[in-house]
Image (cartoon, grey):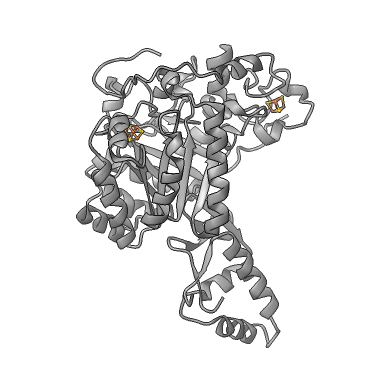
Amino acid sequence: MTRPRLVTGARLHYDEVREEHVLLVPEGVVRLNPTAAEVLELCDGERSLEEIVRALSARYDGADLGDDVHGLLDAMAQRGLVRDAGA
Amino acid sequence: MPEPRAPSPLTLVAELSYQCPLHCPYCSNPLEIGAETYRRELETEHWLRTFRQARGLGVLQLALTGGEPMLRRDLVELCAGARRAGLYSSLITAGTLFTRERAEALKAAGLDHVQISIQSPDAAENDRIAGNRSFAKKIAAARVARELDFPLTLNCVLHRQNLDRIEAVLDLALVLGAQRLELANTQYYGWAVVNQAALMPTREQILRGEEAVRRFRERVGPAVDVLWVLPDLYESLPKPCMGGWGRTAMVIAPNGDVLPCQAAATIPGLEFANVRERPLEWIWNESEAFDRFRGTKWMQEPCRTCPLGRQEVDFGGCRCQALRLTGDAAATDPVCRFSAHHDRVVSAREPVAADEFVYRTVKRPVRA
Ligand code: SF4
Ligand code: SF4
């Protein structure tokens, strides 16, 4: 994965009724924890995977979040929710 | 003991109009679509208010369907209202009226997703099943949807007369750039009940279909999400119909009646509240129709003491199917192997070969 983006038609949304982040996709709702929502917000098909990890680390006092981000995006790609804009 | 509060719904199926240029013999709409009550369609304002109320209840997914939703002149306004309300909207269309000009307006209004149905991947067969010349327009519509960067779902209802072309359906989804493919084995309610003899597939067709889907998934991976649901009649444990009665979804008919499922109007004695008269929140939480089969309190044997403890997994299956096959809407769905009437499901698997269709129409009354 080089430059991840959300699959066509996917939309990040904050559900005020259930007070949680969700990813809205055709005929589906994927519940997200706040960190996952933050990662996916950065997946615009422009930023590289490295840039995403760096941007997040900066927000969390330089913590190494590489494995977490890779793990999340791999799982999302497996489910067809994230694609590689660089592929 | 007070009942726990009703769960929060996720999906609203908005049947905007029962008018449709096509005549599919398996259409899930009621046989009474031509009746006076359904001609009194909701006004724009009713729908917009209902969308806001639905979001307030927790709904996130809105299906704009019909009949043919493109026949509503206010569709662009409805899409804009859905987006403002915070809903994710899907247009469920037969595609024949989805021209570039209208598609662009829907895109600008915030429509999220487009689902286009075909009746067969073969043009002549498509037009025969649809009862109208529509295949070329559908393909053009799918291309427009992709050019405007809509996520596209291709839908094909499967039955004996088109199941052998399943590989061509799968290939068409790939060629058209569909991101989802719904291979919907016919469910026997609405017009499909009248046409059961002409639609019921053979076991061999189902098995070959399943195999074709498996090979396609292996070859294509997550690029096309293929939904293939085994027809109910071939199962021995039921599915949670609509995700459970009054649990995740509701259907609003063109006249504003709110139903727990598309076929619920066939259940005698159920009265449906209408969004013209009541707020959606009351209808969902308090109305008799939504309460009748919600949860597990209404269950009879064998569900009440289910040997597998599946009461909260399948909620006893489909109420409309229970009614149709046993005469009692509160009975266990006979798809279940523990049902005393399971033999009726098994014997329905033997197709009677009769290929004539009774086409869907709003013009004359039809009896099941
Ligand atoms: S199933 Fe066919 S006839 Fe029924 S609404 Fe859809 S396109 Fe129209
Ligand atoms: S007995 Fe009822 S709850 Fe148990 S599996 Fe059958 S339908 Fe489901």
Depth check: give the residue in front, A3 or B49. Answer: A3
Residue B230, can we see it? no
Depicted B27 relative to depicted B348: above or below = below
Q: Position of residue B83 (x, y in %)?
A: 38, 56
Question: Is B344 left, or right, of B180 in this rendering?
Answer: right
Instruction: Kindly identify the residue that appears in the image at 29 percent across and 40 percent down.
Output: B123
Depth check: give the residue in front, B336 or B218. Answer: B218
Q: Position of residue B288 (x, y in %)?
A: 53, 24
Q: Please state, as top left, top right, bottom left or bottom right, where the N terminus of chain B lies in the image.
A: top right
Looking at the image, the residue that sits furthest to the left is: B101
Depicted A40 relative to depicted B221: above or below = below
Depth check: give the residue in front, B57 or B112. Answer: B112
Location of residue B126 (image quadrant)? top left
Q: Position of residue A42 (x, y in %)?
A: 52, 76
Instruction: Kindly identify the residue that appears in the image at 27 percent across and 34 percent down.
Output: B127
Instruction: Kindly identify the residue that appears in the image at 26 percent across and 23 percent down.
Output: B362
Q: Please state, as top left, top right, bottom left or bottom right, where the C terminus of chain B lies in the image.
A: top left
Depicted A83 relative to depicted A26: above or below = below
Q: Position of residue B208 (x, y in %)?
A: 54, 37
Residue B265, can we see it? yes
Ligand 1 quarter of the rendering: top left
Counting the numbered discs, the total is 0
